[in-house]
Amino acid sequence: SAQSDNILANRLNGLDKPTVWHEFTPLSMQHGAVNLGQGFPDWSPPEFVQQSMQRSIQERNANQYARSYAHLPLAQVLVEDYSKRWNIEMDPQTQVATAVGCTQALYCALNGLINPGDEVILLEPAFDIYHAQVKMAGGKCVFVPLRPQSSNKGQEKLGASSIFQLDLAELEAAITHRTKVLLLNTPHNPTGKIFSRDELEGIAKIAQNYPNLVVISDEVYEHLIYEPEEEPHISMATIPGMFDQTLTLSSSGKTFSCTGWKVGWAVGPEH
C-alpha cells in the first residue's frame, strides 16, 4: 500500500519550517557577511583546552562508556566551581547531570518535567530551539515578550539590558494551573540582555508563589560578558529561596570555543 503523507509523529508538525540558522548562514556565506545567526566562535579553542582533550584521549584513555548520570571527574570539577561561586555545598553524585551539549540537557529536562498539555513560558525573543523542544516534549509554549524601551533624544544610549524589559505583571498573568516551566536565558540570546538582581528577585517572587513551577535557567553565556563589575552575571539559583526550584544549564562550548565537542550539563537540587 502507498505510504501515508503523515507518517511522522504529530508533535513534529510545523518543525520543518526554516529557522534563523537555515536562513542566515547561507546568506552570510553568499555575501561574505558576519554571521550573527549562529552562536559559534570562528577561532580555535585555547591551547590548554586542546591539550587537555588530548591527554584525556591518549593518557587517561577516557574513551569508553561513562557513568550515565555524569562522568564523575567532570561532575566533581563542576561542583567545585559552582559551590565556590554560589556559596552552596553540592554533591557531584546527585546534583549534576552531564549531556551532549546544553541542547540535550534542555531536551532531557523538558521531557523529564512536562506532561502532555503542560505549559512552558518562553521570554521572547527566544532561542529558536526552545519552541521545538517544548513541542517535542508534548508541552505548550506561552510567550511573554521582553518589551523594548526607547531612550529620549540627548540621553545616553541604553544597552540591551536596559532596552529589553520584562513586565512582571505580564509574566504573572501568563501563569496558569498548567504552567510547569519558566525557561529563563541569561545572558540572553539573541538580545545580549543580562538580567539584573532586581529583575531576578522579581521573577523569583512570582515563581515562589507556584511551588510546582520549575525555573530552567539557560546560562551558557555566563562567562562571556563585557563589564562584569558593572553588569555581572547572576544565577537564578543564587537568589534566596530559588535553589530548590531552579535547574541551571550550561556548557563548555561557548566558554572555551569548542561548540562541536558538545559537553553540557545541568546542576540543581537532587529532586
Image (cartoon, rainbow, N blue to C red):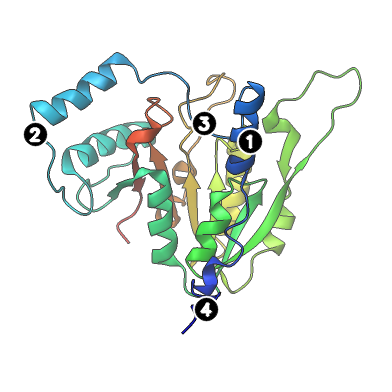
Q: Secondary structure at mark 4?
A: loop
Which image quadrant is residue 132 in? Answer: bottom right
Q: Are marks 2 and 1 in contact (CB under 8 Å)?
A: no
- Disc 1 residue type? Phe
Q: Which is closer to the viewer, label 4 or label 1?
A: 4
Q: Which residue is mark 4?
A: 4
Q: Which residue is mark 2?
A: 61
Question: Neighbour class for label 3 at 10 Å: few (<14), some, many (≥20)?
Answer: many
Question: Neighbour class for label 1 at 10 Å: few (<14), some, many (≥20)?
Answer: some
Label located before the other in sequence (4 or 1): 4
Q: Which residue is mark 3?
A: 233
- In depth, the one of 148 and 243 nearer the eye is 148
In the image, what residue occupies the spot 21% across and 19% down? 51
Where is residue 166? Give x, y as percent: 70, 46
**Would you place residue 18 above or below residue 134 in this image?**
above
- Disc 2 residue type? Asn
Separation of marks 4 and 1 at Cα, in angstroms: 33 Å
Is residue 194 in sight in this rendering?
no
Q: Is residue 59 left or right of residue 51?
A: left
Label located before the other in sequence (3 or 1): 1
Q: Which is closer to the viewer, label 2 or label 1?
A: 1
In the image, what residue occupies the spot 23% across and 34% down? 77
